[in-house]
Image: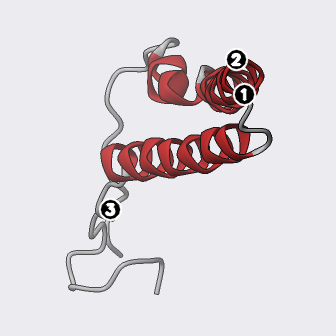
Amino acid sequence: MPSSPQRKSANPYRGLAEAGPYFSLGAQIAGTLAGLTLLGYWLDGRLGTRPWLMLAGIVVAFLGIGALLYRLAKQTAKPQKDYNGDGKIGLG
């Protein structure tokens, strides 16, 4: 019977450290969308181009949010480990 993987010493803050990038994600998404939309709305009022700059702000915000999510996914992706030693991942 294969032995189970050895656990490292329990660090009570390890989970918080790993979840750190996700804590500010909602604020970053909301701030990006609201900020660029309001900037476009304000510029539309100043330049008389309603609603085009506001719509452009929304499009740029969604592109920025997509880049943010892509970067976060790339940083947090980890390969799975082979615990059985037989080249297969899992219990079987």
Estimate the x, y position of residue 55 in percent, counting from the top left. 71, 47
Residue 33 or residue 52, whichever sits in front = 52
Above/below status of 44 relative to 56: above
Q: Secondary structure at mark 2?
A: helix
Q: Quadrant of residue 29?
A: top right
Q: Which residue is mark 3?
A: 3
Is residue 25 rendered to the left or right of residue 78? right
Is residue 37 rendered to the left or right of residue 87? right
Residue drawn 28% across the image and 64% down it: 81
Label 1 sits on what residue type?
Ala
Q: Which residue is mark 2?
A: 46
Whole-angstrom CA distance, mark 1 to mark 3, is 47 Å
Above/below status of 65 relative to 79: above
Q: Which residue is mark 1?
A: 30
Label 2 sits on what residue type?
Arg
Tag in front: 1 or 3: 1
Q: N-terminal of the two: label 1 or label 3?
A: 3
